[in-house]
Amino acid sequence: MSVGNEVLAAQPPSQQSLGTAAARNLATTTKSVPQMQEITSRWLLRMLPWVQVQGGTYRVNRRLSYAVGDGRVTFVQTGDRVAVIPAELGELPALRAYGDDGVLSELARRCEQREFAAGQVMVASGDAADEVFLLAHGRVEKVGSGPYGDDAVLEVLADGAYFGDQALVDGEATWEYTARAATACTVLVLSRRDVRNLAEREDSLRHHLAAVASVPHQRTNKYGEAEIDLSAGHVGESVVPHTFVDYDAAPREYELSVAQTVLKVHSRVADLYNQPMNQTEQQLRLTVEALRERQEHELINNREFGLLNNCDYGQRLQPHDGGPSPDDMDELLSRRRGSKMFLAHPRAIAAFGRECNKRGLVPASVEVAGHHVPAWRGVPIFPSNKIPISDARTTSIICMRTGEAEQGVIGLQQSGIPDEIEPSLSVRFMGIDEQAIISYLVTAYYSAAILVPDAVGVLENVEVGRWG
């Protein structure tokens, strides 16, 4: 008897009402629109002032400048041997615009590879400067005298930098600072003796160096622009100087870039499955979001007009101790007037917060468009995951001034294009093919222009993985 009761108890009770799974077949569910994880805040697109560009091209006219080159040098590595790419020697001011590939190849072969340990002095202040140092890997500190006679780090150099280039054109040059390896360094050294020996056999190199030697004698201001003669503080009938403002004869032009895709929707889907949401509309919304994300990525990383690649080399800084310290952020701010915004990867912002915590500092925040954004010295620090992080866990922090009136950074667009749904973004119907698939061409036109070199500064090689 007890066994039968146990069997009855083990049997599930019979269903007495409609189950929820079956009921859902008759119910209208409440649903969200399609979600997309790729969407970010896109602060750069929101904060850039956008300028209407007719004809698809924006020309930046500037005063004539006598800058002769201040770029980065690229190397190739084979095992433990490093060689400079011959054409990259043209980044040195003394060899800028020199086009004899054979001579540049010979100069590259004459470069001597040297290794320096951390803390080792590479050159000493006051010694004769008769060598050019090309930094293939590592960090070098330029050390000079501080205001009270102690040593002070004047500048930090990293991969691709060079120093001592004045030795190629000035036989009496001396080192005005001490160069010290902050980490283990690999450098290539090109001596003035090797360059002079080659110039004795190659007329083109000899004439080029002679022409470059005259460039520093041009009358320029501290920015390298042609001087404007003025007179001030004079009395009586002094002769007032005559002057004019010379312009750059070959100003840079920015053409609008394009991002495009073809959106395809089957006609059956567009006809029958539009309730409660329009399928074509949702497909288009997500496609536009992806285009805008790509647009911001290009504004930061594009080689032709992206902020990281087009920042003037004189506006690129290196952190003094790896992480983004308050001192580094102050140095970045001091390089330009009227800075409007920082742009940094979220991990770089977190790293800056850790550096502030070490000093007992709490960065303030400012309100922008209803959002509380972290700030430094009153300048908002906007996050952007479009700024890359290298395999070595280093990234960059951008600081910029914006607006045409401020000679800053501007976004370029052309609104009013055919089939426009947003400024400078259009959706064009392309027809229906034999498989009844509807096609739409989705296009965005954009670019960015840096009006003067100091409008953008970049703090490079910022370590984001340091926690100690």
Image: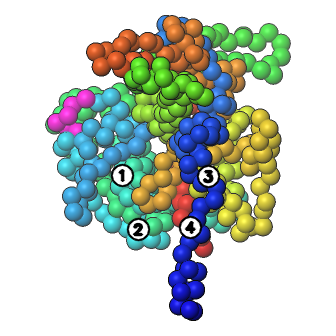
Q: Residue at x 54, y 24 (%)?
A: 274
Viewer-side label of 4, 1: 4
Query: Which residue has dot 2 on it?
Result: 184
The disc at residue 466 is 4
State the CA–CA distance, disc 2 to disc 4: 19 Å
Mark 3 and 4 residues: CB-CB less than 8 Å, in contact? Answer: no
Residue 16 among magenta residues:
no
Q: Residue at x 21, y 58 (%)?
A: 78
The amino acid type, in three-letter code, at marker 4 is: Arg
Residue 100 among magenta residues:
yes
Viewer-side label of 3, 4: 3
Query: Which residue has dot 1 on it?
Result: 134
State the CA–CA distance, disc 1 to disc 2: 14 Å
Q: Earlier in the sequence, mark 3 or mark 2?
A: 3
Q: Position of residue 405 (x, y in %)?
A: 70, 20
The amino acid type, in three-letter code, at marker 3 is: Leu
SS under mark 3:
loop
Question: Where does the magenta region start and end?
Answer: 99-104
State the colouring used for the structure image: rainbow
Camera-side residue: 73 or 340? 340
Q: Residue at x 44, y 60 (%)?
A: 392
Q: Is residue 195 visible?
A: yes
